[in-house]
């Protein structure tokens, strides 16, 4: 039977969708993200057409080993780029400057070679002993493992790792990111890092609808009152008003027309009536700056637009004003008086005060600027220890910087968003609504299962290193696989295989894994009883079961492979 292959038409469809978004979306950030998607899908499409990418295989890039961490986009398609390769990063640039190595195509190779020198190995051993490093992709842990092995006299295993990675020193980072803080370990987890939470809050925007409402209240409300006041100056006698029924509704004649009391507008013009032209000029100037609200546009048929139209006739050619026009002005003035009172009345002033108060209330996006400022002062690649330090009311200094009122409460609007980076026990995060499904639970479990799986390693430095590599590996995105192939497993990484030789899973380590396994499964079933355990969560369940020494017949969430329509081997094993 011929092997199934992926269709490049999917990549072409995603490319077209990204193009459409990039060309038509109103939000510049969304267009920028679409531009990145275009670049990625072009790589996918060209790679599939040229044969450089074999999408559907567990090794879709022939020049990359199975353990290499690939850039994966929607649907499990890979661009062919390696996440441990790419542009020189900031910490690499700092080291190159320290080594007096200029930028060149071989710059990364020079860094990998440096960490194999005596000075480089000394740096790696210091990182191992202090834990002051970070591993963002699994490859960044390779030379740390080599340093540990050499320090413990296992040069054979160290040489095997170097044989595996030796063909890629000029492309990939096999060394960690230095950090001033040691890696933290504990039983608490977080869904997002502080840095991710900041990026999410930066995406918050003040909606166009709210901006238009603000413009209507703060700009066109006062302008409308000025126009009404000017017309009222031309009335002989009492100001026009609608006769109201006892219930407050306008009274109507037998012909279903409104009953208007008071004098008629456009009867007397003050000597300084030229101020009407000045007012119209002010309104045009306002419109040149404020164009979110449709009130000034006649096509919207608003009362304000109609009065501005009649005001211009009165100011420039009053002889063109017909009787029906005066009648319409009279009706509009009476309707306004019935709706909100005359501009100088207590009713109108109270209404305008209330509208201004509501319109100037800060939106979630505006309050988020304060939270972003506070979060920016904290460690970016970890969780948040307490919400209190971020959700305190706005201070006087912050009020000045962000154009807000001092004492403004943040918690009501931002608690849910900031809570996503809170570090807490899993049960608490489920209760708070941060962990909302089995899929979300699967995102945080590796923070605990990494420690559990590392418990069988006696050396603290190696235990910490294994946990960091484990968490980085779990962040890898799954590939689209066909022909019943399986995803690359953690144990296939040469440096992890070397670490596992030092594993001695005693009773304590197995018992810890078993207890954690029980807790994870109970949490998933009791918190989300309506959901099948997702495959990402089953990965952690399998890992914990292996650590506990249990042979459990665990099968994936979809019984038959969705592409091949067949059962994989794990179902035979389970049966």
Image: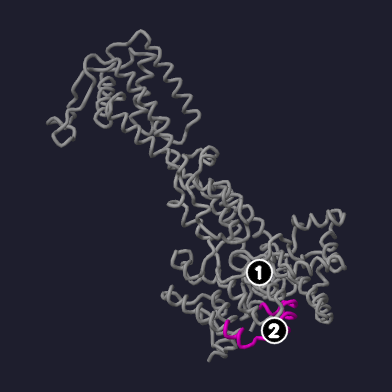
Q: Give the mark nearest the N terminus, 2 or 1.
A: 1
Image location (x, y in percent) of residue 133:
72, 64
Query: What span is in magenta?
Result: 489-512
Residue at left offset 15%, top offset 31%: 252
**Which quarter of the figure is the N terminus placed in?**
bottom right
Q: Is residue 194 above or below residue 361?
A: below
Q: Is residue 571 above or below residue 134?
A: below
Res. 360 image quadrant: top left
Residue at the disc numbered 1? 472
Image location (x, y in percent) of residue 417:
49, 56
Residue at the disc numbered 2? 503
Frontmost residue, 177 versus 110: 177
- Measure the alpha-carbon separation of dots 2 and 1: 20 Å
Image location (x, y in percent) of residue 201:
54, 52
Frontmost residue, 169 versus 30: 169
Frontmost residue, 229 versus 140: 140
**Is 467 included in the stretch rendered in magenta?**
no
Q: Residue lying farthest left? A: 254
Frontmost residue, 88 versus 73: 88
Q: Secondary structure at mark 1?
A: helix
Q: Any mark on residue 174, and which? A: none
User: Relative to residue 506, is residue 148 drawn left or right?
Assistant: right
Q: Is residue 48 visible?
A: no
Q: Is residue 282 above or below residue 185?
A: above
């Amino acid at each position: 039977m011929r092997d199934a292959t992926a269709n490049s038409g999917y990549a072409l469809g995603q490319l077209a969708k990204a193009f459409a978004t990039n060309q038509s979306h109103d939000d510049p950030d969304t267009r920028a993200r679409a531009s990145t998607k275009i670049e990625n899908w072009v790589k996918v499409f060209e790679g599939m057409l040229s044969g450089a990418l074999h999408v559907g295989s567990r090794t879709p890039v022939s020049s990359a080993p199975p353990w290499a961490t690939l850039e994966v986009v929607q649907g499990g398609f890979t661009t062919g780029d390696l996440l441990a390769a790419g542009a020189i990063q900031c910490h690499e640039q700092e080291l190159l400057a320290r080594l007096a190595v200029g930028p060149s195509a071989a710059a990364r190779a020079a860094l990998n070679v440096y960490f194999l020198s005596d000075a480089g190995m000394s740096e790696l051993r210091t990182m191992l002993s202090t834990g002051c490093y970070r591993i963002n992709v699994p490859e960044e842990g390779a030379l740390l493992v080599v340093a540990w092995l050499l320090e413990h006299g296992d040069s054979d295993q160290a040489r095997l790792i170097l044989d595996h990675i030796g063909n890629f020193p000029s492309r990939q980072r096999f060394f960690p990111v230095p950090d001033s803080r040691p890696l933290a370990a504990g039983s608490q987890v977080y869904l997002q890092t502080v840095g991710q939470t900041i990026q999410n809050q930066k995406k918050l925007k003040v909606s166009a609808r709210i901006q238009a409402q603000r413009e209507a209240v703060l700009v066109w409300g006062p302008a409308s009152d000025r126009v009404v006041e000017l017309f009222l100056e031309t009335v002989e006698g009492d100001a026009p008003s609608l006769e109201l029924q006892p219930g407050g509704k306008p009274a109507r004649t037998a012909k279903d027309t409104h009953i208007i009391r008071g004098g008629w507008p456009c009867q007397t013009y003050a000597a300084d009536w030229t101020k009407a032209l000045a007012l119209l000029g002010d309104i045009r100037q306002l419109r040149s700056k404020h164009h979110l609200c449709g009130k000034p546009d006649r096509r919207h048929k608003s009362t304000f637009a109609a009065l501005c139209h009649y005001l211009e006739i009165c100011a420039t050619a009053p002889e063109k004003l017909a009787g029906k026009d005066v009648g319409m002005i009279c009706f509009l003035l009476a309707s306004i008086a019935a709706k909100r009172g005359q501009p100088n009345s207590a009713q109108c002033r109270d209404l305008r005060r209330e509208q201004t108060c509501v319109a100037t209330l800060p939106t979630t996006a505006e309050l988020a600027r304060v939270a972003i400022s506070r979060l920016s002062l904290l460690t970016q690649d970890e969780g948040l220890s307490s919400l209190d330090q971020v959700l305190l009311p706005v201070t006087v200094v912050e009020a000045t910087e962000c154009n807000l009122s001092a004492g403004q409460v943040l918690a009501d609007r931002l608690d849910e968003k900031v809570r996503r980076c809170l570090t807490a026990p899993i049960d608490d995060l489920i209760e708070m609504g941060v962990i909302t499904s089995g899929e979300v639970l699967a995102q945080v479990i590796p923070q605990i299962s990494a420690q559990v799986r590392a418990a069988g390693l006696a050396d603290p430095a190696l235990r910490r290193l294994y946990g960091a590599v484990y968490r980085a590996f779990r962040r890898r995105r799954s590939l689209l696989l066909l022909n019943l192939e399986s995803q690359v497993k953690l144990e296939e990484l040469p440096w992890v295989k070397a670490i596992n030789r030092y594993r001695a899973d005693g009773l304590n380590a197995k018992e810890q894994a078993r207890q954690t396994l029980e807790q994870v499964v109970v949490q998933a079933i009791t918190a989300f009883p309506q959901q099948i355990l997702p495959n990402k969560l089953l990965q952690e369940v399998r890992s914990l079961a292996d650590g506990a020494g249990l042979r459990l017949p665990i099968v994936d969430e979809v019984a038959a492979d969705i592409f091949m329509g067949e059962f994989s081997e794990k179902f035979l094993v389970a049966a």
